[in-house]
Image (tube, helix red, strand yellow):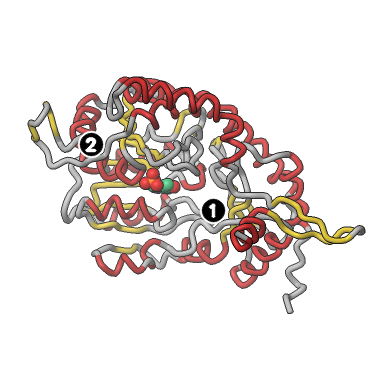
Amino acid sequence: MGLRFYVTLTLTEHRVNTANGEKLLPMVRLNAFERQWAETGPDATRVFEETGASGWYILGRAVQDFERVLAEYWKLPHAIGVASGLDAIEISLRVLGCGTGDRVLTSPLSAFATTLAIAKTGAIPVFADTDPDGLLDLDACEDLLRQRPDIRYFVPVHLYGNPLPRPRLQSLIADFGLLTVEDCAQSIGATYESVPTGAAGQLAATSFYPTKNLGAMGDGGAILASDDGHAKLAKVLRDYGQTAKYRHEQLGYNSRLDELQAGLLHRVYLPRLDQWTARRREAAGRYERELRHENVRILKPVPGADPSRHLFPVAVPPNLRDHFQRHLRDSGIESGIHYPLAIPDQPAMARIPFQVHGDLAQARVLCASEVSLPIHPYLTEQEVESVVRAVNGWRPEILPI
Ligand SMILES: *Cc1c(COP(=O)(O)O)cnc(C)c1O
């Protein structure tokens, strides 16, 4: 009992010395699910009761209704609910015919799931470098595509919720005839020149993992499609490849969104998403205006982009990152790293064939220097202020003893 209490205490609170002695203050967290539950719990409980009473738990009315409103939200003709963001990318690639030996151009700086989805189709991931702000370098991509006409598939990532410039994506896709799945797991709500991400390629994939901007109370994901045929095939593939009950025309998946998650997403979380995104943007705006430190560089969205602010990434000199994160923790602020290893450097990659274009220097430098500051819809003004004060007050020249 004592031990459990102690562990909880250190994770959620930190000690500060005040004039009157030691005080315990709550940590500024990367996520605040308890605050979300305090606001949404009654609505969520209603959905739970209604789903239970309906007697229908997988692929029913709630999934259909959610798919309709999600497609409307995304301003695309079709949304197809699946079991995760990972599956949404893999199934989308399968819909476009991607399979064994095909080459898929993607980013070395992303959640591992982006590449895992490619690898699971049997295709060969091909990595180009990122730019200094962490987005796939589209000039490097163009250079590579000129040299390698056998690359036919493309999985760009709108990392951190920062949209890639759509016109540039579209011209690459058109010039090289690429079949494209945009990874929008972090970019729901983000736009480039007022158009949501996901409209440049044939298909887009998103995730409802709880920490995402539109998170479920468990796993979930969706495929966004413009083409009726693509949408139909995605629905077949997510349900064992069935075209009718017990008629299997494809080797499909068990990758279905359940009624409970669909009900929660549709009735509890999606109606709050715009307001949540607005609060993320307010916090990001304050960080952009108020953070001022010669060793802290904000990773910027491109001009014309209105990001979803899934994360708030900054970069510090690699040799000072531990010191910076320790300083933040001692100031009561949680921080994250997205991501500590370039995907081709992950141990699991030794098990599959892949190709790398250039030295991936930018991506690797970011892996050693990125730090994510707290950003979520329930962050208070006071908490934003504590983060600003801690960052601006960092003294990297004072080395720890
Ligand atoms: C979260 C995430 C995924 C995977 O989504 P899951 O639902 O966790 O499978 C893929 N790509 C990116 C960029 C992500 O952030």
Residue labelled with disc 1: 133
Kind of residue indicated by mark 1: Asp
Ligand 1 within 8 angstroms of badge 2 C-beta = no
Element assignment for label 1: loop
Image quadrant occupied by the C terminus: bottom right
Which callout, 1 or 2, points to the residue nearer the camera?
Answer: 2
x and y, in percent, of residue 38 in the image: 61, 33
Q: Is residue 255 above or below residue 341?
A: above
Query: How busy is the neighbourhood of tag 1: few (under 14 within 10 Å), some, or many (20 plus)?
Result: many
Mark nearer the N terminus (1 vs 2): 1
**Horizontal side, residue 58 vs residue 372: left or right:** left
Q: Nearer the viewer, residue 244 or 305?
A: 244
- Write the residue at 35% across / 22% down: 62
Residue labelled with disc 2: 238
Q: CA distance from mark 1 to mark 2?
A: 35 Å
Residue extending farthest to the right is 19
Using the rendered view, name the quadrant where residue 322 is placed.
bottom right
Kind of residue indicated by mark 2: Arg
Residue 184 in view of the camera = no
Q: Is residue 103 above or below residue 56?
A: below
Element assignment for label 2: helix
Image quadrant occupied by the N terminus: bottom right
Query: How busy is the neighbourhood of tag 2: few (under 14 within 10 Å), some, or many (20 plus)?
Result: many
